[in-house]
Image (spheres, helix red, strand yellow):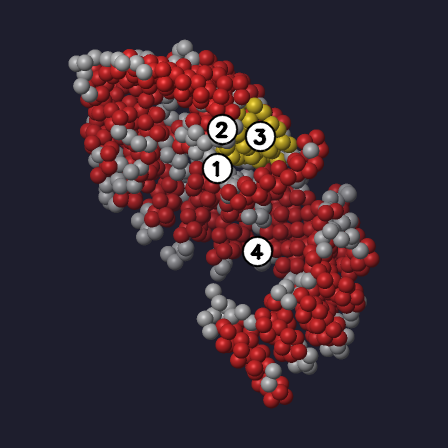
């Protein structure tokens, strides 16, 4: 926001700069210029003083020159014509005997960043490359990179490139590193600076002369070089040996990254290098800089994925300090979980128990979650600690413990008896939605072992009208249905009341649709309902903490010394807070039962006469067959922001429009268009669509409201497709669903005519029945027209992987068919439902009718 007294301030400063008495006094003149810079930093628009400041740059005072150049570089873009007046002064300063003045003039000449001044800058920059002062050569080298950014479309001057290559042997190490950076920028489209054997050995021999960031830049560029023989490789490794144990963490990390790149085919050398960096990494964990400590912890986690015992003897170095920030404490706890073994488990659990009462709730949750992960291998000791924490009766601690117990029994079913005894009576302390969802899941799955389960659920059902959380309502429905299957006498009445509320009074469509689904399941019989709801209680295939297979180093070597390890903690936290454990991940492996997620046989049992249900079943079978032959998994990480999605989608759409589909497919990118026959998908509620997509790890970015034409949905996912045993391939898929709705417009007139005929009937009951019949018939006609039109699916994939793209399209088609078939029969089923509820005049409420059905 501009300074309020800006106009008066500018007027006073202009008067002072134009005063001859001030100009004759060097000190007063400099102080006036300093006031201009101070006003500029406060937000005052002083661009009107540009001409006065141009006159002030013609001075021998270096301090005054610096102040004036700061002003000119800030406002040159607003005054491009007046900026031409500065060029003569700057070119004159480039010939000054003082090297500081020459470097200052060159730097600010390129910082003006005006394309109209390029022709005046080239000659001083060329002369600066041959200047006898190293500080001038440093500025001139970077000046050529800035000049290239101003005119990226212009041809590259071969003479300048050759001059920069020759300066790689400059005696000044900063000039050498600046040449590498400038060549990387100028030759970006050609792959960057060319690295051959003479340049590689020269850079390695000069490595010790560079500063910290110069060494990191050299080591990063050297990763492109591949030695021509094994002797040369070991010569390079010998030169890098000192940098591998450097006291500077950035240099050590860059050197190890180069080691991993060069020694990908020498596992023994790679392991030796990882052993050598253990000391520097542990020293970095005690750095004064918090950012350095966090980065070191993240990279240690990478190493432990392949060498679990690398830091085992130094686990005490990862104990949390009292004054450490929460994000470092949480990352240290993740490392401690990786280091647990039979010898230190007692001490680690005792340390983690102390963190569970931390004043920071996030830290306390992380400590409780860490205890739960250790409990996969040491369940008795961990359950004793978790049960003791429930006795504290603190809201956030109880919530985290119940969630941890839920996840623990999913992996270790042998802990269920202890957990069922522990969770009794803790519902009064739970206040947050995540904790209540976890408790409801436990009561639904293990309700026959918890004596107070029906009474606890009744308290939740009595307060369902005031419940604000959608997840709690849906979990309450599922838990009550499961408890009814094992304890029907105690649950029958409350289930009827809950279904009545969710179908009659609930405004959220997700809850209502789920209640209707359960009601229709009950029509099919208790045995069919039991097949759907009483599935697996645990997933032992997730494995335990100790004895898990280690990952090959090549799987994470490419992400070492990048920002990728820093994102892993956020991804783990996101995946750990997804509600019920059945819905946590979608990883179709050959031994994974996909029928729980994508099988439509239950829909076919309820709607046995629906053609779309049979089509959905066929699609599910195709997905199951394809997943069994080619392992494919979908993932939501790394997440894409809406801005990133829009930028990628529009850029590739423009590329597709300019170059054509055939030319794009030759590159590492593919775009396809398909038509999927899925009736009524455009009338699906956004909540149901988003929930169904997230169930299979497909993220919806944006969608138009239902009944809006044209109807669009934008989505994305990441695929992990394994071509062979050791080469997983990851791709990004962006997608668009488009339904224009021309079929709806064709049937609109017919529907209105049919209703007009019905309205002329005298008998009101016949009128209502025929209105419903006309609605069903017109709805079916609309569905047939939609089947002819279909939904247009546009997919963009990078990098290209046709098998993964086909697998994703099959999964997406199955989801669309599932939603479509359910929506297609919704009108007819609603009619049957209300006929069933109100056909008997003796039944006065849906609760009585529901209770009689359950009996």
Asked if marks 2 and 1 touch (Cβ < 8 Å), the reply is: no
Asked if marks 3 and 4 touch (Cβ < 8 Å), the reply is: no
Asked if marks 2 and 4 touch (Cβ < 8 Å), the reply is: no
781 or 851: nearer the viewer: 781
Chain-order first, disc 2 or disc 4: 4
Q: Residues within 10 Å of mark 4 (few under 14, many from 20)?
A: many
* Mark 3 vs mark 2: in front: 3
Residues at marks 2 and 1, CA–CA distance in whole angstroms? 25 Å
Asked if marks 3 and 1 touch (Cβ < 8 Å), the reply is: no
Q: Secondary structure beneath disc 3?
A: strand
* Position of residue 38 in the picture relative to residue 363 (left or right): right
Residues at marks 3 and 2, CA–CA distance in whole angstroms? 24 Å
* Position of residue 791 in the picture relative to residue 65 (left or right): left
Image quadrant assignment for residue 66: bottom right
Most distant residue in the front direction: 760
* Position of residue 427 in the picture relative to residue 807 (left or right): left
Residue designated by label 1: 702
Chain-order first, disc 3 or disc 1: 1
Residue designated by label 3: 794
Residue designated by label 2: 587
């Amino acid at each position: 926001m501009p300074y309020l007294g800006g106009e008066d301030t500018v007027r006073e400063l202009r008067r002072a700069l134009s005063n001859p008495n001030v100009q004759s006094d060097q000190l007063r003149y400099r102080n006036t210029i300093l006031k201009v810079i101070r006003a500029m930093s406060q937000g005052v628009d002083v661009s009107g003083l540009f001409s006065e400041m141009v006159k002030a740059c013609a001075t021998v005072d270096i301090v005054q020159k610096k102040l004036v150049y700061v002003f000119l570089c800030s406002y040159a873009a607003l005054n491009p014509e007046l900026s031409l007046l500065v060029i003569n002064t700057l070119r004159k300063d480039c010939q000054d005997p003082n090297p500081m003045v020459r470097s200052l003039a060159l730097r600010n000449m390129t910082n003006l960043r005006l394309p109209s001044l390029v022709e005046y800058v080239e000659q001083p920059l060329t002369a600066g490359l041959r200047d006898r002062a190293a500080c001038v050569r440093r500025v001139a080298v970077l000046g050529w990179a800035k000049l290239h950014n101003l005119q990226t479309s212009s041809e590259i001057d071969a003479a300048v490139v050759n001059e920069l290559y020759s300066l790689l042997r400059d005696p000044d190490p900063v000039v050498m590193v600046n040449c590498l950076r400038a060549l990387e920028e100028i030759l970006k489209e050609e792959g960057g600076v060319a690295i051959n054997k003479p340049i590689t050995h020269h850079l390695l021999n000069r490595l010790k002369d560079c500063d910290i960031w110069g060494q990191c830049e050299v080591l990063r560029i050297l990763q492109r070089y591949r030695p021509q023989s094994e002797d040369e490789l070991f010569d390079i490794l010998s030169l890098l040996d000192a940098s591998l144990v450097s006291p500077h963490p950035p240099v050590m990390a860059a050197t190890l990254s180069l080691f991993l790149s060069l020694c990908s085919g020498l596992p023994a050398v790679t392991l030796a290098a990882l052993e050598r960096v253990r000391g520097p990494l542990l020293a970095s964990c005690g750095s004064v800089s918090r950012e350095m400590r966090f980065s070191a912890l993240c990279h240690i986690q990478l190493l432990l994925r392949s060498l679990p015992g690398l830091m085992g003897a130094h686990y005490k170095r990862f104990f949390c300090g009292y004054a450490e920030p929460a994000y470092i404490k949480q990352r240290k706890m993740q490392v401690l979980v990786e280091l647990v073994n039979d010898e230190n488990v007692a001490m680690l659990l005792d340390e983690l128990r102390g963190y569970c009462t931390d004043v920071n709730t996030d830290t306390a949750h992380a400590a409780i979650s860490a205890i739960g992960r250790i409990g996969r291998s040491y369940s008795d000791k961990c359950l004793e600690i978790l049960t003791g924490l429930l006795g504290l009766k603190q809201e956030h601690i109880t919530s985290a413990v119940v969630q941890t117990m839920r996840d623990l029994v999913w992996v270790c079913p042998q802990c269920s008896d202890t957990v069922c005894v522990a969770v009794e009576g803790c519902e009064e302390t739970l206040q947050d939605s995540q904790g209540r969802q976890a408790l409801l899941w436990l009561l639904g799955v293990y309700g026959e072992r918890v004596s107070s389960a029906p009474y606890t659920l009744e308290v939740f059902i009595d307060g369902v009208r005031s419940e604000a959380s959608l997840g709690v309502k849906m979990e309450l429905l599922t838990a009550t249905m499961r408890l009814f299957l094992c304890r029907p006498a105690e649950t029958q009445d409350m289930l009827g009341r809950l279904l009545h509320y969710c179908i009659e009074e609930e405004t959220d469509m997700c809850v209502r649709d789920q209640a209707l689904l359960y009601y229709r399941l009950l029509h099919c019989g208790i045995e069919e309902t039991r097949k759907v709801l009483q599935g697996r209680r645990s997933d032992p295939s997730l494995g335990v903490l100790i004895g898990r297979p280690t990952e090959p180093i090549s799987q994470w070597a490419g992400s070492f010394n990048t920002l990728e390890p820093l994102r892993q903690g956020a991804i783990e936290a996101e995946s750990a807070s997804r509600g019920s454990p059945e819905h946590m991940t979608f990883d179709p492996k050959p031994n994974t039962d996909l029928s729980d997620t994508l099988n439509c046989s239950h829909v076919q049992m309820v709607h046995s006469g629906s053609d779309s249900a049979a089509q959905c079943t066929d699609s599910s079978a195709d997905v199951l067959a394809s997943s069994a032959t080619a392992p494919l998994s979908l993932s939501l990480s790394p997440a894409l922001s809406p801005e990133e999605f829009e930028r990628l989608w529009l850029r590739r759409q423009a590329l597709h429009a300019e170059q054509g589909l055939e030319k794009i497919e030759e590159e590492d990118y593919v775009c396809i268009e398909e038509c999927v026959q899925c009736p009524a998908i455009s009338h699906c509620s956004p909540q149901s669509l988003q929930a169904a997509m997230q169930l299979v790890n497909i993220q919806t970015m944006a969608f138009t409201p239902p009944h809006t034409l044209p109807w669009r949905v934008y989505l994305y996912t990441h695929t992990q497709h394994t071509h062979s045993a050791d080469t997983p391939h990851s791709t990004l898929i962006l997608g668009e669903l488009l339904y224009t709705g021309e079929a709806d417009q064709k049937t609109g007139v017919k529907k209105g005519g049919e209703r007009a005929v019905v309205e002329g009937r005298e008998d009101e009951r016949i009128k209502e029945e025929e209105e419903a019949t006309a609605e069903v018939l017109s709805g079916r006609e609309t569905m047939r027209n939609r089947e002819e039109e279909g939904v247009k699916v546009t997919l963009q994939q990078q990098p290209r992987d046709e098998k993964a793209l086909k697998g994703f399209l099959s999964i997406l088609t199955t989801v669309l068919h599932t939603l479509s078939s359910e929506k297609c029969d919704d009108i007819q089923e609603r009619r049957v439902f209300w006929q069933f509820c109100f056909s008997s005049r003796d039944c006065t409420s849906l609760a009585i009718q529901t209770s009689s059905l359950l009996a």
